[in-house]
């Protein structure tokens, strides 16, 4: 599948097919073959995947930054706060979900399906070790996973996750000197994957086009979005 962002002339069916412009969030033509379900789901995923960073800003300031990001168009968020207790994380996730849902945004909770359910989140984001141990798709609307190599990507595809993040693509301040994939290796790893892949690691919002040129759906951001 290719996302075409610009063209010349008017598209037309070369074999006499009728064409219809459709909003992927509300397709009105039928019958629609089930093979299109995954494509439509991918089209409905934003190109930016924002990862919470309350540990850096504090909860109050972060929530203000979250509202600003939502006002600016962020529509997909991962709650990932590894230093919080389960109770504090549940309360924080509830707050993020409440604000995000008011803006039509979706929220996933990193690593804990129980907290995701308690907070009213839209799904769960599996850590790589959880992904490799998981035997079946959990009962959740959205399932994402973190991947770092081909083996993890193949396991994510086998499990039927809705999307993954693949990292680290570029050097990051949090892991100076760590080995990175680089764009060419990133493209090689995710080119034939059946699910959308977000690039993570050293990303900025203005790298979306570069990521797409290397077979990514979009970019995931920790620091660069808040």
Image (tube, rainbow, N blue to C red):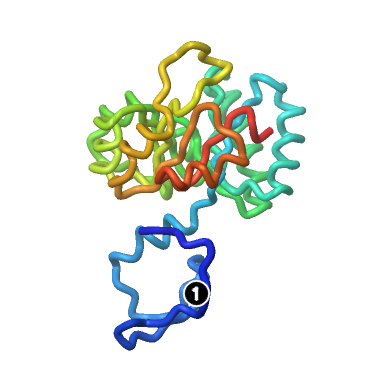
Label 1's element?
Answer: loop
The image shows residue 193, relative to residue 51, as above or below, that is below
Closest to the observer, 4 or 23: 4
On the rendered image, what quadrant is the N terminus found in? bottom left
Closest to the observer, 102 or 41: 41
Q: How many marks?
A: 1
Task: Using the rendered view, name the quadrant where residue 130 is placed.
Answer: top left
Residue drawn at x 32%, y 24% is: 129
Q: Position of residue 186 (x, y in %)?
A: 38, 34
- Left or right: 192 in relation to 52: left
- Taking the view exactly as shown, the residue that stands out farthest to the front is 8
Identify residue for label 1. 22
Q: Position of residue 107 (x, y in %)?
A: 54, 43
Q: Position of residue 89 (x, y in %)?
A: 57, 26
- Taking the view exactly as shown, the residue that stands out farthest to the top is 177
Closest to the observer, 22 or 138: 22
Residue drawn at x 76%, y 28% is: 61
Residue drawn at x 45%, y 59% is: 3
The image shows residue 167, relative to residue 72, as above or below, that is above
Task: Using the rendered view, name the quadrant where residue 172 is placed.
Answer: top right
Q: Position of residue 62 (x, y in %)?
A: 71, 30
- Taking the view exactly as shown, the residue that stands out farthest to the bottom is 16
């Amino acid at each position: 599948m290719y996302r075409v962002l610009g063209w010349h002339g008017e598209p037309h069916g070369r074999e006499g097919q009728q064409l219809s412009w459709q909003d992927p969030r509300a397709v009105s033509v039928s019958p629609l073959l089930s093979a299109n379900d995954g494509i439509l789901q991918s089209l409905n995923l934003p190109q930016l995947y924002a990862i919470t960073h309350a540990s850096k800003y504090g909860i109050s300031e972060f929530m203000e930054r979250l509202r600003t990001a939502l006002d600016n168009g962020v529509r997909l968020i991962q709650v990932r706060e590894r230093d919080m207790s389960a109770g504090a994380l549940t309360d924080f996730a509830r707050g993020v979900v409440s604000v995000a849902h008011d803006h039509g945004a979706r929220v996933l909770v990193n690593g804990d399906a129980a907290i995701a359910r308690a907070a009213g989140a839209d799904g769960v984001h599996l850590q790589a070790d959880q992904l490799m141990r998981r035997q079946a798709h959990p009962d959740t609307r959205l399932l994402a996973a973190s991947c770092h190599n081909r083996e993890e990507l193949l396991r994510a595809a086998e499990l039927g996750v809705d999307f993954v993040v693949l990292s680290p693509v570029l050097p990051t301040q949090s892991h100076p000197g760590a080995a990175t994939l680089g764009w060419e290796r990133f493209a090689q790893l995710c080119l034939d994957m059946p699910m959308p892949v977000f690039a993570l690691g050293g990303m900025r919002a203005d790298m979306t086009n570069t990521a797409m040129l290397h077979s990514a759906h979009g970019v995931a951001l920790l620091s660069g979005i808040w």
